[in-house]
Image (cartoon, rainbow, N blue to C red):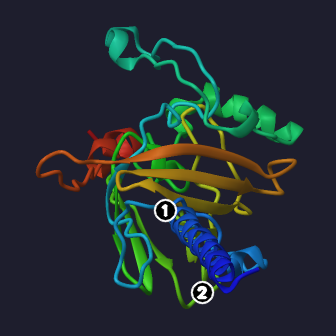
């Protein structure tokens, strides 16, 4: 081969290598833009996925602050249910129960036999037994899906959740996790982040709250694992695993979306219902 031919061959090889290198570089950029795993991830060093297009705190955690509300009929009944007439015919359609789709995985609450019988008894006597009727704090997870919005105020050490019904509230301890000092209606919440998901471990409940108006109940052994996962700026996925060895045969789960209230000048309001229950609770003690 002549020297001239050798130079032409080298130029062709160099041109081919250059084109391949350019294509590889462009391909790498495209893979990165599409969210392909990085080299470290390919080696097994996975990192939690980040939700795009959501508000974030200065520390990079999702900012869940705002007014949120569930749009379900779960407060009536956690399971699938049809319409039902109200207890007083004078109220007509106002007192009737709307139909709704269940929020429980498998559409079944795994009661122990004695507890299933008590649930039916609770339903029959719901107008006198339901803690909501008496304006007691609603407990969890019920406070989340009552027909009232709730507010999240987010900090680093604490995340506060305030509920309109009966001015219930709870702090979520994000750093110094402690055991509940006493059983309460709203329990004791310790939280942490798993990627962009807020995970809350809740214990320390009393047995004075229900899950819904259908009489679904729990004991003081109730244990919840809540998961709040941002889907977008205005949508959270809410998942709860419920465990109570005194009442249920196994853990069970409910799920629903939560929507950010976005009306102009939307505000958190209190529904202080104590005064509306005084005659119901204490009227029999009146000397009138």
Give residue 67's position: percent from left, percent from top.
30, 55
The answer to whether residue 113 shows anywhere in this view is yes
In screen coordinates, is 70 left or right of 21?
Answer: left
Look at mark 1 in the image and give the residue it sits on: 51
- Per the model, the C-alpha gap separating discs 1 and 2 is 26 Å
Comes first in the chain, label 1 or label 2: 1
What secondary structure is marked by label 1? loop
**Residue 45 rendering spot, x and y as whole percentages:** 73, 80
Left or right of 250 on screen, residue 136: left
Question: Circle 2 sits on which residue?
Answer: 177
90 vs 230, nearest the viewer: 230
Pick the quarter of the image with the C terminus: top left
Instruction: Give the side of residue 121 with respect to residue 246, left or right.
Output: left
Give how far across and how far down residue 272 sits, in percent.
Answer: 27, 52
User: Which-is-in-front pick, marks 1 and 2?
Assistant: 1
Residue 204 visible here: no
Q: Residues within 10 Å of mark 1 (few under 14, many from 20)?
A: some
**In the image, farthest residue toward the left:** 265
Please tell me how many numbered marks the rendered image carries: 2
Measuring from the top left, give residue 179's x and y in whole percent. Answer: 65, 84
Q: Residue at x 66, y 61 (%)?
A: 224
Label 2 neighbour load within 10 Å: few <14, some 14-19, many 20+: some
Q: Is residue 110 above or below residue 266?
A: above
For the N terminus, the image quarter is bottom right
> Up-down: is 6 above or below 244?
below
Quadrant of res 205: bottom right
Q: Nearer the viewer, residue 259 or 60?
A: 60
């Amino acid at each position: 081969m002549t020297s001239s031919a050798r130079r032409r061959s080298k130029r062709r090889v160099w041109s081919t290598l250059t084109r391949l290198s350019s294509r590889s570089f462009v391909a790498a950029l495209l893979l990165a833009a599409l969210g392909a795993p990085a080299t470290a991830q390919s080696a097994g060093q996975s990192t939690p996925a980040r939700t795009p297009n959501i508000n974030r705190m200065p520390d990079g955690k999702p900012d869940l602050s705002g007014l949120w509300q569930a749009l379900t009929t779960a407060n009536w009944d956690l399971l699938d249910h049809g319409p039902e007439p109200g207890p007083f015919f004078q109220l007509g359609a106002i007192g009737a129960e709307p139909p709704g789709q269940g929020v429980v995985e498998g559409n079944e609450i795994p009661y122990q036999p004695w507890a299933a019988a008590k649930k039916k008894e609770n339903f029959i006597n719901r107008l006198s037994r339901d803690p909501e009727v008496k304006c007691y704090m609603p407990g969890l997870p019920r406070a989340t899906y009552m027909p009232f919005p709730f507010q999240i105020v987010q900090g680093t050490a604490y995340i506060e959740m305030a509920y309109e019904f009966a001015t219930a509230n709870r702090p979520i301890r994000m750093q110094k996790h402690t055991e509940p000092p006493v059983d309460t209606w709203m329990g004791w919440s310790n939280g942490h982040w798993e990627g962009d998901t807020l995970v809350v471990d809740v214990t320390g409940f009393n047995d004075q709250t229900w899950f819904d108006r259908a009489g679904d109940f729990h004991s003081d052994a109730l244990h919840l694992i809540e998961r709040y996962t941002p889907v977008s700026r205005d949508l959270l996925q809410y998942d709860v695993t419920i465990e109570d060895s005194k009442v249920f045969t196994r853990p069970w789960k409910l799920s629903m979306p939560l929507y950010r209230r976005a009306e102009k000048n939307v505000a958190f309001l209190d529904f202080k219902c104590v005064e509306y229950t005084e005659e119901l609770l204490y009227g029999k003690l009146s000397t009138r």
